[in-house]
Image (tube, rainbow, N blue to C red):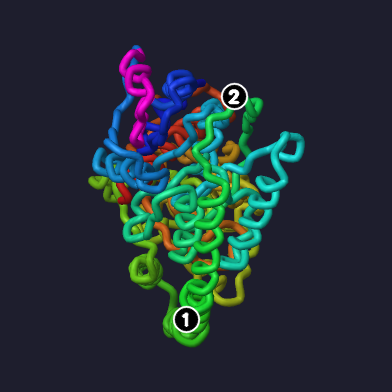
């Protein structure tokens, strides 16, 4: 597992930044344990006067060293580490302390949290603090800091004073960073004001005995700095932070409402009446039906362009030479209402097996029924003869092997139906791997989020290749799902590492 984590972090563009000041007793152990899970480790020596440098240079796998000649504080050390990491091409940085309190073994936890919430600032919430021997001042400071943070951002967070975090580096540009311990709080507040999601993730913490602890916290001076910073942030929240947050929430609501209302109004007032009149004027011919499919495809392409204008750029890659002229069973992972839009934009020569509520939809159900889309609930034996006639006319058949949208963005279990149809109709399977729609509009999501949408067209899978997964349809479905899981993760890592 540690080696898998090292590979996954590198692919996703995640490194580790460790600021240190005179932690010679623990730094070697912390870095060595960290390197088991992450091969890209930056250590910022913040004016060290002990033998920390010698300890690091003696390690078998030497980390990237950033040496500040004089002590400038944790905030400046983090800033130096972030700049070096981003210059090296990293998209994220996990920060942990050099005193041994944080468990590097929890780095995979941050990796999984980043996969669930890409682009978010992940804050490690220390578990078991209630059973740790701490001073009353420390307990009060933590609870008080959480309250300050909520008042300033309206974001509930259990632990705002932990240094174990994952930062999205591209989203930190222009955020002011103070010099010392209060820098981590200011980073949280300004990131939240900028619209960066701030989420908590439970992690372990080790508190050594008082005699073993190495702390550079100056109770009077640093507490005063934190207090004054919170006062300033509260004042700034009243005139800037909270108004900006409210405007952002309002903007998201208005954008989502505008898109939904415009889509419904366009369908109800223009598209559905227009298509109805067109189909009812004169007899139905194959040429008329082809024009209907062409209209559906152009309307879907228009929808993808509108999504791009509202912060969801849509791009198609992979096997771009695919022209969809040869019929195939097209399969795609299913995560959002936006999935169908992306699929229909590919080609007019397409019919889709849909859910009942889509087939009976009062806004556009009439159109998809006239376009020969079929309800999957009718049963494959029932609809197969209809599909044979459509395939003979040159149409491909689109199926969602998962049947329903994913709850958490992961690839669900694949059903056998698509592979049964491919065998019965004598067609290749054409996989489409879709990424980003879950993060843009998840199942049960209320607002449309800004996130790129990527659709990859894979190479066709002929019968001979499917048989390599197994002769029965269940084995073929399982084997294809494994391909989807791996390829989906690769696309996700590429998007997060490069931003495109």
Where's residue 91, x and y in %? Answer: 35, 44
- Highlighted range, magenta: 39-59
Q: Secondary structure at mark 1?
A: helix
Q: Would you say residue 436 sits in the magenta stretch?
A: no
Q: Secondary structure at mark 2?
A: loop
Q: Which residue is mark 1?
A: 262
Q: Residue at x 46, y 64 (%)?
A: 195
Q: Which of the two residues, 153 or 341, is positioned nearer the viewer here? A: 153
Q: Indicate whether 288 appears above or below 57.
A: below
* Left or right side of 130 for 451: left
Q: Which residue is mark 2?
A: 212
Q: Indicate whether 325 appears above or below 232.
A: above
**Total numbered labels placed on residues in the image:** 2
Q: Residue at x 52, y 42 (%)?
A: 217
Q: Which of the two residues, 338 or 59, is positioned nearer the viewer here? A: 59
Q: Quadrant of residue 149?
A: bottom right
């Amino acid at each position: 597992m540690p080696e898998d984590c090292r590979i996954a972090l590198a692919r996703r563009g995640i490194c580790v930044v460790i600021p240190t000041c005179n932690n010679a007793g623990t730094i070697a152990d912390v870095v060595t344990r960290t390197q088991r899970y992450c091969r890209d480790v930056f250590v910022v020596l913040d004016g060290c006067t002990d033998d920390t440098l010698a300890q690091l240079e003696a390690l078998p796998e030497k980390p990237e060293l950033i040496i500040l000649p004089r002590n400038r504080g944790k905030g400046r050390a983090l800033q130096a580490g972030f700049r070096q990491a981003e210059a090296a091409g990293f998209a994220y940085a996990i920060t942990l302390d050099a005193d041994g309190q944080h468990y590097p073994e929890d780095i995979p936890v941050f990796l999984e949290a980043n996969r669930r919430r890409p682009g978010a600032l992940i804050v490690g919430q220390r578990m078991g603090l209630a059973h740790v021997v701490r001073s009353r001042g420390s307990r009060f400071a933590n609870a008080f800091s959480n309250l300050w943070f909520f008042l300033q951002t309206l974001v509930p967070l259990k632990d705002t004073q932990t240094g174990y975090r994952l930062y999205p580096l591209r989203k930190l540009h222009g955020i002011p960073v103070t010099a010392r311990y209060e820098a981590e709080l200011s980073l949280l507040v300004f990131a939240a004001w900028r619209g960066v999601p701030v989420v908590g993730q439970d992690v372990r913490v080790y508190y050594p005995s008082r005699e073993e602890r190495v702390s550079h916290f100056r109770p009077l001076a640093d507490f005063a700095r934190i207090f004054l910073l919170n006062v300033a942030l509260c004042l700034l929240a009243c005139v800037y932070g909270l108004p900006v947050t409210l405007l952002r929430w309002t903007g998201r609501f208005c954008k989502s409402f505008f898109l939904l209302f415009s889509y419904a109004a366009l369908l109800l007032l223009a598209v559905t009446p227009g298509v109805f009149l067109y189909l009812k004027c004169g007899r139905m011919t194959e040429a008329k039906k082809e024009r209907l499919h062409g209209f559906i495809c152009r309307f879907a392409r228009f929808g993808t362009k509108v999504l791009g204008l509202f912060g969801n750029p849509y791009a198609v890659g992979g096997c771009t030479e695919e022209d969809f002229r040869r019929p195939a069973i097209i399969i795609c992972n299913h995560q959002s209402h936006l999935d169908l839009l992306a699929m229909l934009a590919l080609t007019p020569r397409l019919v889709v097996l849909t859910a009942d509520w889509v087939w009976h939809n009062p806004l556009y159900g009439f159109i998809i029924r006239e376009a020969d889309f079929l309800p999957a609930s009718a049963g494959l034996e029932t609809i197969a003869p209809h599909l044979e006639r459509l395939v003979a006319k040159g149409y491909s058949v689109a199926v969602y092997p998962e049947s329903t949208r994913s709850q958490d963005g992961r690839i669900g279990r694949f059903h056998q139906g698509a592979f049964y149809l491919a065998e019965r109709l004598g067609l290749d399977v054409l996989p489409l791997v879709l990424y980003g729609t879950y993060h843009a509009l998840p199942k049960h999501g209320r607002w449309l989020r800004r996130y790129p949408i990527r659709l990859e067209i894979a190479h066709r899978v002929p019968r001979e290749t499917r048989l390599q997964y197994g002769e029965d349809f269940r084995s073929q479905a399982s084997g294809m799902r494994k391909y989807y899981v791996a390829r989906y993760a690769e696309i996700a890592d590429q998007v997060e590492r490069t931003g495109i």
